[in-house]
Image (cartoon, rainbow, N blue to C red):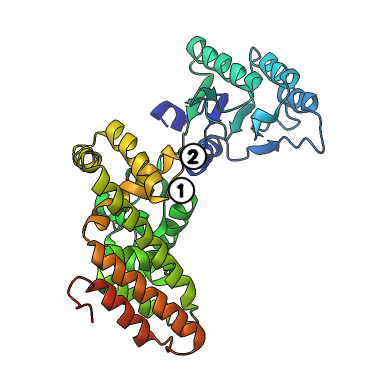
Amino acid sequence: MNDAMQKIPAQFTLLMGDDTISREKMKSDIVAAVQNKFPTASFERFDPETMSFASFTEKMLSPSLFQEVRIFLLRDAHTLSRGDLDMLTEVFPYDLPDAFVVVETDRPLVKKGKDKAGPKDFLAWAETFQKHIVKKPAKFAFAEFVRTPDYKMAEWVERQTPLLLGRSIGRKDAEYLVDLVGADSGALFSELQKIDIHLPPNKPIDRGAIESISGATRLMTQFECAQALGRRDFPRVLEIIESLYLGSVYLPLYLAAIFKHFWALFRIKNYAQAHPKDIADFQNAVKRYNKAVQDDVGLKIGVAAGLLSDKQRASIYPVIVKSGVVDQALTFEYRDYKRIFAWLYDFDTGIKTGRIDDSKIGFQLLCYKIFKAREIGDD
Protein backbone atom coordinates (compact mmCIF):
# COMPACT_ATOMS: atom_id res chain seq x y z
CA MET A 1 0.00 0.00 0.00
CA ASN A 2 1.12 3.55 -0.61
CA ASP A 3 1.53 6.04 2.24
CA ALA A 4 -1.85 7.65 1.66
CA MET A 5 -3.61 4.30 1.83
CA GLN A 6 -1.82 3.43 5.07
CA LYS A 7 -3.18 6.61 6.66
CA ILE A 8 -6.75 6.08 5.52
CA PRO A 9 -7.87 3.63 2.80
CA ALA A 10 -10.08 4.47 -0.12
CA GLN A 11 -13.80 4.20 0.53
CA PHE A 12 -14.22 1.54 -2.18
CA THR A 13 -11.45 -1.01 -2.78
CA LEU A 14 -11.49 -3.84 -5.30
CA LEU A 15 -9.04 -6.72 -4.72
CA MET A 16 -8.72 -9.29 -7.49
CA GLY A 17 -6.50 -12.27 -8.24
CA ASP A 18 -5.66 -15.89 -7.45
CA ASP A 19 -2.62 -15.11 -5.26
CA THR A 20 -4.66 -15.67 -2.11
CA ILE A 21 -1.85 -14.99 0.36
CA SER A 22 -0.97 -11.55 -1.02
CA ARG A 23 -4.62 -10.62 -1.51
CA GLU A 24 -5.51 -11.55 2.08
CA LYS A 25 -2.52 -9.59 3.35
CA MET A 26 -3.69 -6.49 1.50
CA LYS A 27 -7.21 -6.86 2.92
CA SER A 28 -5.79 -7.26 6.44
CA ASP A 29 -3.71 -4.11 5.96
CA ILE A 30 -6.76 -2.15 4.82
CA VAL A 31 -8.81 -3.33 7.81
CA ALA A 32 -5.92 -2.53 10.16
CA ALA A 33 -5.58 0.98 8.68
CA VAL A 34 -9.29 1.66 9.24
CA GLN A 35 -9.21 0.27 12.79
CA ASN A 36 -6.11 2.31 13.56
CA LYS A 37 -8.00 5.47 12.61
CA PHE A 38 -11.37 4.31 14.00
CA PRO A 39 -10.81 1.76 16.84
CA THR A 40 -14.53 1.02 17.27
CA ALA A 41 -15.07 0.12 13.58
CA SER A 42 -17.46 -2.80 13.09
CA PHE A 43 -17.83 -5.36 10.29
CA GLU A 44 -20.66 -6.05 7.86
CA ARG A 45 -20.23 -9.19 5.73
CA PHE A 46 -22.48 -10.13 2.84
CA ASP A 47 -24.07 -13.56 3.30
CA PRO A 48 -26.39 -14.51 0.41
CA GLU A 49 -27.97 -17.19 2.63
CA THR A 50 -29.32 -14.68 5.14
CA MET A 51 -29.83 -11.43 3.19
CA SER A 52 -30.49 -10.07 -0.25
CA PHE A 53 -27.87 -7.96 -1.98
CA ALA A 54 -30.31 -5.07 -2.03
CA SER A 55 -30.42 -5.17 1.79
CA PHE A 56 -26.62 -5.18 1.89
CA THR A 57 -26.32 -2.06 -0.26
CA GLU A 58 -29.09 -0.35 1.72
CA LYS A 59 -26.99 -0.84 4.87
CA MET A 60 -24.12 0.97 3.17
CA LEU A 61 -26.33 3.96 2.44
CA SER A 62 -27.99 4.00 5.88
CA PRO A 63 -26.00 5.80 8.61
CA SER A 64 -25.02 3.59 11.53
CA LEU A 65 -27.17 3.86 14.64
CA PHE A 66 -24.33 4.91 16.94
CA GLN A 67 -22.27 6.75 14.32
CA GLU A 68 -19.67 3.98 14.24
CA VAL A 69 -17.52 3.38 11.21
CA ARG A 70 -18.38 0.15 9.41
CA ILE A 71 -16.24 -2.04 7.14
CA PHE A 72 -18.30 -3.81 4.47
CA LEU A 73 -16.65 -7.01 3.23
CA LEU A 74 -17.87 -8.59 0.00
CA ARG A 75 -16.18 -11.87 -1.00
CA ASP A 76 -16.54 -13.83 -4.27
CA ALA A 77 -17.82 -10.78 -6.09
CA HIS A 78 -17.62 -12.67 -9.40
CA THR A 79 -20.69 -14.68 -8.32
CA LEU A 80 -22.91 -11.59 -8.22
CA SER A 81 -25.57 -11.21 -10.87
CA ARG A 82 -25.55 -8.32 -13.29
CA GLY A 83 -28.39 -6.73 -11.35
CA ASP A 84 -26.45 -6.96 -8.08
CA LEU A 85 -23.38 -5.44 -9.71
CA ASP A 86 -25.51 -2.57 -11.02
CA MET A 87 -26.87 -1.99 -7.49
CA LEU A 88 -23.32 -1.79 -6.15
CA THR A 89 -22.38 0.70 -8.87
CA GLU A 90 -25.34 2.88 -7.88
CA VAL A 91 -23.80 3.29 -4.42
CA PHE A 92 -20.58 4.83 -5.79
CA PRO A 93 -21.83 8.45 -6.23
CA TYR A 94 -22.93 8.69 -2.59
CA ASP A 95 -20.74 10.04 0.15
CA LEU A 96 -20.52 7.38 2.85
CA PRO A 97 -18.94 9.12 5.85
CA ASP A 98 -19.03 6.05 8.08
CA ALA A 99 -18.40 3.17 5.66
CA PHE A 100 -15.49 1.47 3.89
CA VAL A 101 -16.25 -1.17 1.26
CA VAL A 102 -13.81 -3.95 0.29
CA VAL A 103 -14.85 -6.05 -2.72
CA GLU A 104 -12.89 -9.26 -3.25
CA THR A 105 -12.59 -12.06 -5.82
CA ASP A 106 -10.09 -14.78 -6.67
CA ARG A 107 -10.57 -14.18 -10.40
CA PRO A 108 -7.74 -12.21 -12.06
CA LEU A 109 -8.51 -9.49 -14.53
CA VAL A 110 -5.52 -10.39 -16.73
CA LYS A 111 -5.97 -12.56 -19.77
CA LYS A 112 -5.22 -16.28 -19.57
CA GLY A 113 -4.75 -17.59 -23.07
CA LYS A 114 -7.53 -16.30 -25.27
CA ASP A 115 -10.15 -15.85 -22.55
CA LYS A 116 -10.30 -13.73 -19.45
CA ALA A 117 -10.62 -15.61 -16.19
CA GLY A 118 -14.09 -14.77 -14.98
CA PRO A 119 -17.78 -14.09 -15.86
CA LYS A 120 -18.10 -11.45 -18.55
CA ASP A 121 -20.53 -9.30 -16.55
CA PHE A 122 -18.19 -9.12 -13.58
CA LEU A 123 -15.07 -8.45 -15.68
CA ALA A 124 -16.89 -5.64 -17.47
CA TRP A 125 -17.90 -4.24 -14.07
CA ALA A 126 -14.30 -4.47 -12.81
CA GLU A 127 -13.07 -2.50 -15.81
CA THR A 128 -15.76 0.12 -15.13
CA PHE A 129 -14.61 0.26 -11.51
CA GLN A 130 -11.10 1.14 -12.67
CA LYS A 131 -12.48 4.10 -14.58
CA HIS A 132 -13.85 5.50 -11.32
CA ILE A 133 -10.29 5.48 -9.92
CA VAL A 134 -9.18 7.89 -12.65
CA LYS A 135 -12.01 10.27 -11.75
CA LYS A 136 -11.68 10.00 -7.94
CA PRO A 137 -8.41 8.30 -6.92
CA ALA A 138 -8.93 9.16 -3.25
CA LYS A 139 -12.28 7.37 -3.14
CA PHE A 140 -11.54 4.26 -5.26
CA ALA A 141 -8.63 1.83 -5.18
CA PHE A 142 -7.80 -1.34 -7.11
CA ALA A 143 -5.15 -4.02 -6.67
CA GLU A 144 -4.60 -7.26 -8.55
CA PHE A 145 -2.69 -10.29 -7.27
CA VAL A 146 -1.89 -12.85 -9.94
CA ARG A 147 -0.47 -16.19 -8.83
CA THR A 148 3.25 -16.33 -9.51
CA PRO A 149 4.39 -19.03 -11.99
CA ASP A 150 6.21 -21.97 -10.41
CA TYR A 151 9.56 -20.91 -11.87
CA LYS A 152 9.27 -17.53 -10.11
CA MET A 153 8.14 -18.77 -6.69
CA ALA A 154 11.56 -18.17 -5.11
CA GLU A 155 11.30 -14.55 -6.23
CA TRP A 156 7.79 -14.43 -4.70
CA VAL A 157 9.11 -15.77 -1.37
CA GLU A 158 11.97 -13.25 -1.36
CA ARG A 159 9.61 -10.36 -2.14
CA GLN A 160 6.72 -11.35 0.13
CA THR A 161 8.57 -12.47 3.28
CA PRO A 162 9.37 -8.90 4.43
CA LEU A 163 5.74 -7.88 3.75
CA LEU A 164 4.15 -10.92 5.42
CA LEU A 165 6.51 -11.45 8.35
CA GLY A 166 8.76 -8.40 8.62
CA ARG A 167 11.85 -10.55 7.97
CA SER A 168 14.25 -10.88 5.07
CA ILE A 169 15.26 -13.97 3.09
CA GLY A 170 17.92 -14.24 0.39
CA ARG A 171 17.22 -15.59 -3.10
CA LYS A 172 19.31 -18.75 -2.59
CA ASP A 173 17.56 -19.51 0.70
CA ALA A 174 14.18 -18.85 -0.93
CA GLU A 175 15.07 -21.28 -3.72
CA TYR A 176 16.05 -23.88 -1.13
CA LEU A 177 12.70 -23.47 0.66
CA VAL A 178 10.80 -23.88 -2.63
CA ASP A 179 12.82 -27.02 -3.39
CA LEU A 180 11.86 -28.45 -0.01
CA VAL A 181 8.21 -27.43 0.15
CA GLY A 182 7.11 -27.05 -3.46
CA ALA A 183 5.64 -24.12 -5.39
CA ASP A 184 2.25 -23.87 -3.66
CA SER A 185 2.03 -20.40 -2.09
CA GLY A 186 -0.20 -21.63 0.75
CA ALA A 187 2.28 -24.35 1.75
CA LEU A 188 5.19 -21.91 1.49
CA PHE A 189 3.44 -19.33 3.67
CA SER A 190 2.66 -22.04 6.23
CA GLU A 191 6.33 -23.03 6.41
CA LEU A 192 7.41 -19.39 6.64
CA GLN A 193 5.03 -18.90 9.57
CA LYS A 194 6.48 -21.96 11.35
CA ILE A 195 10.00 -20.64 10.85
CA ASP A 196 8.94 -17.18 12.02
CA ILE A 197 7.64 -18.58 15.33
CA HIS A 198 10.98 -20.22 16.14
CA LEU A 199 13.29 -17.33 15.19
CA PRO A 200 14.24 -14.33 17.34
CA PRO A 201 12.73 -10.98 16.26
CA ASN A 202 14.20 -9.38 13.12
CA LYS A 203 16.52 -12.30 12.39
CA PRO A 204 16.66 -13.17 8.65
CA ILE A 205 15.44 -16.55 7.47
CA ASP A 206 18.48 -18.52 6.31
CA ARG A 207 19.25 -22.06 5.17
CA GLY A 208 20.02 -23.21 8.70
CA ALA A 209 16.58 -22.17 9.96
CA ILE A 210 14.89 -23.77 6.96
CA GLU A 211 16.76 -27.06 7.44
CA SER A 212 16.14 -27.26 11.19
CA ILE A 213 12.44 -26.37 11.05
CA SER A 214 11.02 -27.21 7.60
CA GLY A 215 13.52 -29.92 6.67
CA ALA A 216 13.26 -31.74 9.99
CA THR A 217 9.47 -31.99 10.04
CA ARG A 218 8.83 -32.74 6.37
CA LEU A 219 8.32 -36.31 5.17
CA MET A 220 10.64 -37.44 2.39
CA THR A 221 8.99 -38.93 -0.69
CA GLN A 222 9.84 -41.69 -3.14
CA PHE A 223 10.08 -39.07 -5.88
CA GLU A 224 12.83 -37.21 -4.03
CA CYS A 225 14.74 -40.47 -3.72
CA ALA A 226 14.43 -41.07 -7.46
CA GLN A 227 15.50 -37.51 -8.26
CA ALA A 228 18.54 -37.76 -5.99
CA LEU A 229 19.59 -40.99 -7.73
CA GLY A 230 19.15 -39.34 -11.11
CA ARG A 231 21.37 -36.46 -9.99
CA ARG A 232 23.90 -38.99 -8.64
CA ASP A 233 23.67 -37.27 -5.26
CA PHE A 234 24.36 -40.28 -3.04
CA PRO A 235 24.71 -38.35 0.27
CA ARG A 236 21.18 -37.03 -0.32
CA VAL A 237 19.97 -40.56 -1.13
CA LEU A 238 21.35 -41.85 2.18
CA GLU A 239 19.72 -38.96 4.02
CA ILE A 240 16.35 -39.80 2.45
CA ILE A 241 16.70 -43.52 3.21
CA GLU A 242 17.51 -42.74 6.85
CA SER A 243 14.32 -40.67 7.13
CA LEU A 244 12.23 -43.40 5.50
CA TYR A 245 13.25 -46.06 7.96
CA LEU A 246 12.36 -43.93 10.97
CA GLY A 247 8.85 -45.25 10.38
CA SER A 248 7.27 -48.00 8.32
CA VAL A 249 8.20 -48.08 4.65
CA TYR A 250 6.72 -50.00 1.70
CA LEU A 251 9.64 -50.37 -0.72
CA PRO A 252 7.69 -51.34 -3.88
CA LEU A 253 6.42 -47.73 -4.03
CA TYR A 254 10.00 -46.46 -4.02
CA LEU A 255 11.15 -49.00 -6.59
CA ALA A 256 8.27 -48.01 -8.87
CA ALA A 257 9.16 -44.31 -8.56
CA ILE A 258 12.84 -45.02 -9.27
CA PHE A 259 11.96 -47.14 -12.30
CA LYS A 260 9.55 -44.51 -13.65
CA HIS A 261 12.18 -41.79 -13.24
CA PHE A 262 14.95 -43.76 -14.97
CA TRP A 263 12.57 -44.90 -17.70
CA ALA A 264 11.89 -41.21 -18.45
CA LEU A 265 15.65 -40.54 -18.44
CA PHE A 266 16.16 -43.47 -20.81
CA ARG A 267 13.55 -42.05 -23.20
CA ILE A 268 15.24 -38.63 -23.06
CA LYS A 269 18.55 -40.38 -23.84
CA ASN A 270 16.94 -41.94 -26.91
CA TYR A 271 15.48 -38.57 -27.94
CA ALA A 272 18.92 -36.99 -27.59
CA GLN A 273 20.39 -39.70 -29.82
CA ALA A 274 17.80 -38.98 -32.52
CA HIS A 275 17.63 -35.18 -32.08
CA PRO A 276 21.01 -33.89 -30.83
CA LYS A 277 20.33 -30.36 -32.12
CA ASP A 278 17.17 -30.08 -30.00
CA ILE A 279 19.10 -31.04 -26.89
CA ALA A 280 21.86 -28.51 -27.67
CA ASP A 281 19.28 -25.78 -28.33
CA PHE A 282 17.49 -26.59 -25.08
CA GLN A 283 20.65 -26.49 -22.96
CA ASN A 284 21.74 -23.20 -24.53
CA ALA A 285 18.28 -21.71 -24.00
CA VAL A 286 18.34 -22.66 -20.30
CA LYS A 287 21.79 -21.10 -19.83
CA ARG A 288 20.80 -17.90 -21.62
CA TYR A 289 17.25 -17.70 -20.17
CA ASN A 290 15.71 -17.86 -23.64
CA LYS A 291 12.25 -18.87 -22.45
CA ALA A 292 10.65 -19.16 -25.90
CA VAL A 293 13.17 -21.75 -27.18
CA GLN A 294 13.34 -23.40 -23.76
CA ASP A 295 9.57 -23.96 -23.73
CA ASP A 296 9.30 -25.03 -27.39
CA VAL A 297 12.02 -27.66 -27.19
CA GLY A 298 11.29 -28.53 -23.55
CA LEU A 299 7.75 -29.51 -24.48
CA LYS A 300 9.05 -31.84 -27.21
CA ILE A 301 11.45 -33.46 -24.74
CA GLY A 302 8.76 -33.76 -22.06
CA VAL A 303 6.34 -35.44 -24.45
CA ALA A 304 9.04 -37.81 -25.74
CA ALA A 305 9.90 -38.74 -22.13
CA GLY A 306 6.28 -39.36 -21.20
CA LEU A 307 6.47 -36.64 -18.54
CA LEU A 308 4.18 -34.13 -20.25
CA SER A 309 1.29 -34.03 -22.67
CA ASP A 310 1.02 -31.61 -25.59
CA LYS A 311 -1.25 -29.36 -23.49
CA GLN A 312 1.05 -29.08 -20.44
CA ARG A 313 3.24 -26.24 -21.64
CA ALA A 314 2.79 -24.46 -18.29
CA SER A 315 4.52 -27.38 -16.52
CA ILE A 316 7.73 -27.30 -18.56
CA TYR A 317 9.72 -25.33 -16.00
CA PRO A 318 9.19 -27.52 -12.90
CA VAL A 319 9.09 -30.85 -14.75
CA ILE A 320 11.86 -30.43 -17.35
CA VAL A 321 13.95 -27.33 -16.61
CA LYS A 322 14.17 -27.11 -12.84
CA SER A 323 14.35 -30.88 -12.29
CA GLY A 324 17.40 -31.11 -14.57
CA VAL A 325 16.20 -34.38 -16.14
CA VAL A 326 17.91 -33.65 -19.46
CA ASP A 327 21.34 -33.36 -17.86
CA GLN A 328 20.57 -36.39 -15.69
CA ALA A 329 19.67 -38.48 -18.73
CA LEU A 330 22.92 -37.66 -20.50
CA THR A 331 25.12 -38.69 -17.55
CA PHE A 332 24.08 -42.34 -17.92
CA GLU A 333 25.10 -44.64 -20.78
CA TYR A 334 22.87 -47.24 -22.43
CA ARG A 335 24.54 -50.09 -20.59
CA ASP A 336 23.98 -48.20 -17.30
CA TYR A 337 20.24 -48.11 -17.96
CA LYS A 338 20.23 -51.82 -18.84
CA ARG A 339 21.91 -52.68 -15.54
CA ILE A 340 19.70 -50.36 -13.48
CA PHE A 341 16.49 -51.83 -14.91
CA ALA A 342 17.77 -55.36 -14.29
CA TRP A 343 18.69 -54.55 -10.67
CA LEU A 344 15.31 -52.92 -10.01
CA TYR A 345 13.46 -55.91 -11.48
CA ASP A 346 15.52 -58.37 -9.45
CA PHE A 347 15.13 -56.41 -6.20
CA ASP A 348 11.39 -55.89 -6.69
CA THR A 349 10.64 -59.56 -7.37
CA GLY A 350 13.08 -60.57 -4.62
CA ILE A 351 11.39 -58.61 -1.80
CA LYS A 352 7.93 -59.70 -2.99
CA THR A 353 8.90 -63.38 -2.93
CA GLY A 354 10.96 -63.16 0.26
CA ARG A 355 14.20 -63.98 -1.54
CA ILE A 356 15.64 -60.52 -0.74
CA ASP A 357 15.41 -58.75 2.60
CA ASP A 358 13.79 -55.30 2.43
CA SER A 359 16.04 -53.93 5.18
CA LYS A 360 17.60 -50.48 5.16
CA ILE A 361 21.01 -51.93 4.31
CA GLY A 362 19.58 -53.86 1.35
CA PHE A 363 17.91 -50.73 -0.06
CA GLN A 364 21.08 -48.68 0.52
CA LEU A 365 23.10 -51.29 -1.40
CA LEU A 366 20.67 -51.18 -4.32
CA CYS A 367 20.89 -47.38 -4.47
CA TYR A 368 24.68 -47.54 -4.22
CA LYS A 369 24.79 -49.91 -7.21
CA ILE A 370 22.63 -47.46 -9.21
CA PHE A 371 24.96 -44.62 -8.19
CA LYS A 372 28.00 -46.67 -9.30
CA ALA A 373 26.34 -48.25 -12.37
CA ARG A 374 29.08 -47.17 -14.74
CA GLU A 375 31.89 -48.55 -12.58
CA ILE A 376 30.40 -51.94 -11.72
CA GLY A 377 31.35 -54.78 -14.01
CA ASP A 378 28.77 -56.80 -15.95
CA ASP A 379 29.30 -59.77 -13.65
Q: CA distance from mark 2 to mark 1?
A: 8 Å
Helix, strand or loop for disc 1: helix
Per the rendering, the mark at residue 185 is 1
| Amino acid type, residue under disc 1 in the picture | Ser
Q: Is residue 19 above or below residue 342?
A: above
* Picture coordinates of residue 21, whole percent (x, y): 49, 44
**What x and y, as percent, mark residue 231?**
26, 62
Q: Is residue 261 above or below residue 287?
A: below
Residue 211 rendering spot, x and y as whole percentages: 32, 67
Query: Between 131 and 203, which is closer to the camera in this rendering?
Result: 131
Residue at 27 percent of width and 78 percent of height: 368
Residue 348's place in the image compared with 194, above or below, is: below
Judge the density around disc 1: few (<14), some (14-19), many (≥20) Cα neighbours within 10 Å.
Answer: many
Label annotation for residue 19: 2
Report if the CB atoms under discs 2 and 1 are less than 8 Å apart: yes
Please name the amino acid that badge 2 sits on.
Asp
Picture quarter containing residue 92?
Answer: top right
